[in-house]
Image: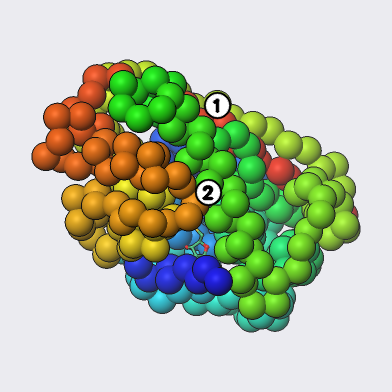
Amino acid sequence: MIEIDWAEHAGRLRSVAEVEADWNAGVAGSLVRDGDKVAVDVGCGGGGMALALAKALPDGAMVVAIDADPDVLEQAREHTAGLVRCELASMDDGAEPLRQAIGAPADLIWASASVHHAGDQQAAVDALASLLAPGGRLALAEGGLPARSLPWDLGVGEPGLELRLDIAQDRWFKVMRESLPGSVPMGYGWTEALTRAGLTEVTTRSILTETSAPLSAERQEKVVEAFRVRIGQLTGEAASGHGHGHGHGHGHVEAGADWLSAEDLAAWKVLLDPESPQYLGRRKDLAVLSVRSIHVGHAPR
Ligand SMILES: C[S@@+](CC[C@H](N)C(=O)[O-])C[C@H]1O[C@@H](n2cnc3c(N)ncnc32)[C@H](O)[C@@H]1O
């Protein structure tokens, strides 16, 4: 049984919104169409895309950020500083609460890494599709490729540490999904889900983002913190806290978690320990390479 307490991730999601500001601005610019008046960010986290949409849309347009967690929504409210209306609602409760939260048919709905936390993903996609104005677009940022930040051989532990972390997280993800209330498997891809929701002209676009080594000190700290959070998630140790990205516990990793081998856990412990000579945060060869997919469907006119 795995249950995510999103309030514990509120500070980190705010930090993600800040780090991804440029990416969000570029994507928002490419999604917005002339005449759009209402845009929505569902499962908005720190509100990064909501803010980008508010900046991309003309004056008089409205952006609504929706999240099911009050602490997360508070972070979005602060981050979007009066440019976005923030509303508490859950995709798990069907279309009506979302419709009331938005208050008008939507020209664009964005949902990034949030629908996969709904118990019934197809029902959530159906609900979101039903909120669109004629010709409106539903954009789901889901899938893509696992990000890469580390060299294959770190000189600590067995080579391939990052790949094995991805695999462990994939197995964790399956149990997380099965643990969701009302969990329903969805044995097909996101484009099919959009099509089954009655949307047309369904397409996928994947965006590769690269920041080469050496990273700035600030970026490097965020990359290390992201590994800390991932390992903390697998070991059951909350590594995120409410702060701005600096986990507590200095990367302490509990032995005995069964998602990763004892050897890999020991390697991560050394790599995430600021006191260790092999601390990741001091390396000059960390980079960020990521590929994120955006699946878009259109409501019939
Ligand atoms: C992985 S985070 C993604 C946040 C943000 N969209 C991003 O891409 O950075 C998932 C977000 O979805 C929210 N969430 C989870 N289940 C939800 C639901 N059933 N309805 C609405 N939001 C939900 C969480 O509170 C969290 O903010």
Q: Which mark is residue 169?
A: 2
Image quadrant assignment for residue 128: bottom right
Q: Is residue 9 left or right of residue 182?
A: left
Residue 208 badge = 1
Q: Residue at x 64, y 57 (%)?
A: 174
Q: Nearer the viewer, residue 300 or 138?
A: 138
Mark 1 or mark 2, earlier in chain: 2
Are there few (<14), some (14-19), or many (20+) residues within 10 Å of tag 2? some
| Residue occupying the point 76% across, 63% down | 185
The quadrant where residue 232 appears: bottom left
Residue displayed at 68% across by 56% down: 107
Residue 125 image position (x, y, % from top left)? 74, 62
Q: Is residue 156 above or below residue 46?
A: above
Q: Amino acid at mark 1?
A: Leu
Nearer the observer: mark 1 or 2; the answer is: 2
Cα separation, mark 1 vs mark 2, equals: 21 Å
Q: Amino acid at mark 2?
A: Gln
